[in-house]
Image (cartoon, rainbow, N blue to C red):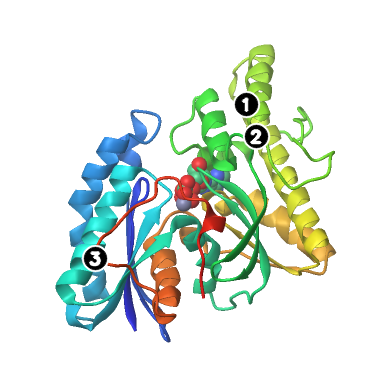
């Protein structure tokens, strides 16, 4: 079955064609980063309008790139939440309407399930069960994954998400939006010995996270040490090291507590090289294996939605003609096969 995947939950318009046996055949992504850069963050109304402009041409493009005609598409998967309501409605409306016109099933996909399954787009996909660390701009979740739709939340951020902490730190350091890649780049020239930031909630049991204190720590360190280029780089490095260590410690704890030996790390922040290296080193010591998506599928994309939707469509799932989106949608409230 050829599945068209549509992702419009935030500031990327992502579209893909995934085949149940052949895997990913085509994908296209349009990032709105430049549109929002002047505002220092995503402007929801601008995001919705831009999705409207870009979505249909991108759908046409991936169908051609996959060497198909629209008659061959057997199902449509669209992100139904969590995310910005207007942005979600664009993808859901277009997806549902095309499915109606083409007389094929449509399925609503949870955005974080998309991230969680993204490593399955790679050659050596993880088998169930596994632990997943999902680190994005809106979420930091540790999940025990028994099967598709079998999700137990082991821990989550009590305040800012990891990506949000990167974005806010970038703002304080005078770097652009999105902040994660900019902080990571600056951190490369930072001196790791100069500052040491706390590793929040690591010295007590539990798998929850808290990143908002790091913001205050960054601001105080900036105020006390000035804003010359080297100081900013040293702060970026200290901040990144603190996030990296914290995430690796919590992943190790989740593996040890669950007895599982497979770990998935996905979501925008999983593109961070320092995080990938630290987690690789940690799993090596734990005799476990880590699975990451390729870099372009760490951040939002249509391929992960097409894959998740394909699995759900094959199990017979599909939406009625009436459609809904869920701007807030806890991952453990969805069910599955
Ligand atoms: O998954 P994603 O594309 O969107 C959401 O679902 O939120 O994640 C975006 C987040 C942003 O906060 C961005 O700053 C962060 O991922 N990010 C990174 C890196 N690349 C993206 N954070 C740290 N290092 C990176 N290389
Ligand atoms: Zn995302």
Q: Quadrant of residue 195?
A: top right
Residue marked by disc 1? 215
**Image spot of residue 227 (x, y percent):** 59, 18
**Image spot of residue 290 (x, y percent):** 68, 66
Q: Which one is nearer the viewer's eye here, 37 or 164?
A: 164
In the rendered image, the residue lying farthest to the left is 101
**Image spot of residue 35 (x, y percent):** 29, 38
Residue in view at x 50 percent, y 37 percent: 179
Q: Quadrant of the N terminus?
A: bottom left
Closer to the camera: disc 1 or disc 2?
2
Residue in view at x 53 percent, y 48 percent: 136
Residue marked by disc 3? 321
Check disc 2 and report its element: helix, strand or loop. loop
**Image spot of residue 191 (x, y percent):** 72, 33
Looking at the image, how many numbered discs can be counted on the residues? 3
**Residue 181 located left or right of residue 235:** left
Residue in view at x 78 percent, y 46 percent: 206
Q: Are marks 1 and 2 in contact (CB under 8 Å)?
A: yes
Vertical order, 172 against 129 (above or below): above
Check disc 3 and report its element: helix, strand or loop. loop
Residue marked by disc 2? 211
């Amino acid at each position: 079955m050829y599945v068209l995947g549509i992702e419009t939950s935030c500031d990327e318009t992502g579209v893909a064609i995934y085949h149940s046996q052949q895997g990913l055949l085509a994908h296209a992504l349009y990032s709105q980063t430049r549109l929002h850069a002047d505002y220092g963050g995503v402007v929801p109304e601008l995001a919705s309008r831009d999705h409207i402009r870009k979505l249909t041409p991108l759908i046409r493009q991936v169908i051609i790139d996959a060497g198909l005609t629209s008659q061959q598409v057997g199902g449509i998967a669209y992100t139904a939440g969590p995310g910005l309501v207007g942005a979600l409605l664009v993808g859901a409306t277009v997806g549902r309407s095309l499915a109606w016109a083409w007389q094929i099933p449509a399925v609503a996909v949870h955005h974080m399930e998309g991230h969680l399954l993204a490593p399955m787009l790679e050659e050596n996909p993880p088998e169930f069960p596994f632990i997943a660390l999902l680190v994005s701009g809106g979420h930091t979740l540790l999940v025990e994954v028994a099967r598709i739709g079998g999700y137990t939340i082991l821990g989550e951020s009590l305040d800012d998400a990891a990506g949000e902490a990167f974005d806010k730190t970038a703002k304080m350091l005078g770097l652009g939006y999105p902040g994660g890649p900019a902080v990571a780049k600056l951190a490369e020239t930072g001196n790791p010995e100069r500052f040491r930031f706390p590793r929040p909630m690591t010295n007590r049991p539990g798998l929850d996270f808290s990143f908002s204190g790091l913001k205050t720590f960054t601001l105080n360190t900036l105020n006390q040490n000035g804003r010359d280029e080297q100081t900013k780089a040293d702060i970026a490095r200290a901040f990144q090291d603190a996030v990296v260590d914290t995430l690796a410690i919590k992943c190790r704890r989740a593996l040890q507590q669950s007895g599982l030996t497979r770990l998935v790390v996905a979501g925008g922040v999983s593109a961070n090289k320092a995080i990938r290296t630290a987690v690789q080193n940690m799993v090596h010591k734990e005799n476990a294996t880590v699975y990451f998506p390729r870099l372009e599928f760490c951040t939002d994309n249509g391929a992960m939605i097409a894959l998740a939707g394909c699995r759900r469509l094959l199990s017979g799932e599909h939406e009625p003609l009436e459609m809904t989106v869920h701007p807030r949608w806890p991952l453990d409230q969805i069910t599955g096969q």
